[in-house]
Amino acid sequence: MCPPVTGMSCGAHDIGYMFLGEVALGREYHITVYEPSLKQPSPGFDSVIARGHTEPVPTQDTKLELDGQRVVVPQGQPMPCPEFSSSSFFQSEYLIYQESQCRLRYLLEVRL
């Protein structure tokens, strides 16, 4: 399944931009410590998952089918992940390095 990613960036005049992108993670390389020199996944991997202290409750995920592919949209409130309590990341982050691994699905402009 390809998880979507969301983000928000604030522009001028209290206008924000939110996006939802469909991401192909492939083979995931997991880290719990910040590695500033990491410019690409380790050989044999397609993406990096920085495992954080919290993640959305997976039982509240929404599963969709887009263009014949099953995708998961996290919907739950953040919950602690005890197995990653010593991680240097607060929330889990998904990193991809090839533009072809992401398809922008929605882009919203919101006034803050």
Image: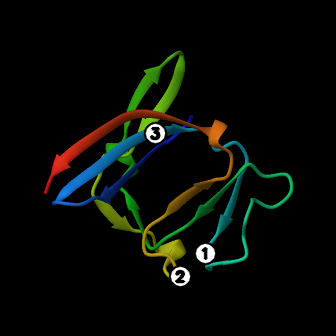
In primary-sequence order, the first of circles 2 and 1 is 1
- The disc labelled 2 sits on which kind of residue? Ser
Res 24 seen here: no
User: Which residue is identified by label 3?
Assistant: 21
- State yes or no: discs 2 and 1 in contact (Cβ < 8 Å): yes
Q: Is residue 11 rendered to the left or right of residue 74?
A: left
Residue 16, given in percent of the width and then of the height, sits at 24, 54
36 shown above or below 39: below
- State yes or no: discs 3 and 1 in contact (Cβ < 8 Å): no
Q: CA distance from mark 2 to mark 3?
A: 25 Å
4 shown above or below 12: above
Kind of element beneath mark 1: loop
In primary-sequence order, the first of circles 2 and 3 is 3
Q: Residue furthest top?
A: 68
Residue 57, given in percent of the width and then of the height, sits at 35, 54
- The disc labelled 3 sits on which kind of residue? Gly
- The disc labelled 1 sits on which kind of residue? Thr
Viewer-nearest residue: 77 or 102? 102
Q: Could you tell me which quadrant the C terminus lies in? A: bottom left
Viewer-nearest residue: 13 or 50? 13
Kind of element beneath mark 3: strand
In primary-sequence order, the first of circles 3 and 1 is 3
User: Which residue is identified by label 1?
Assistant: 32
User: Which residue is identified by label 2?
Assistant: 88
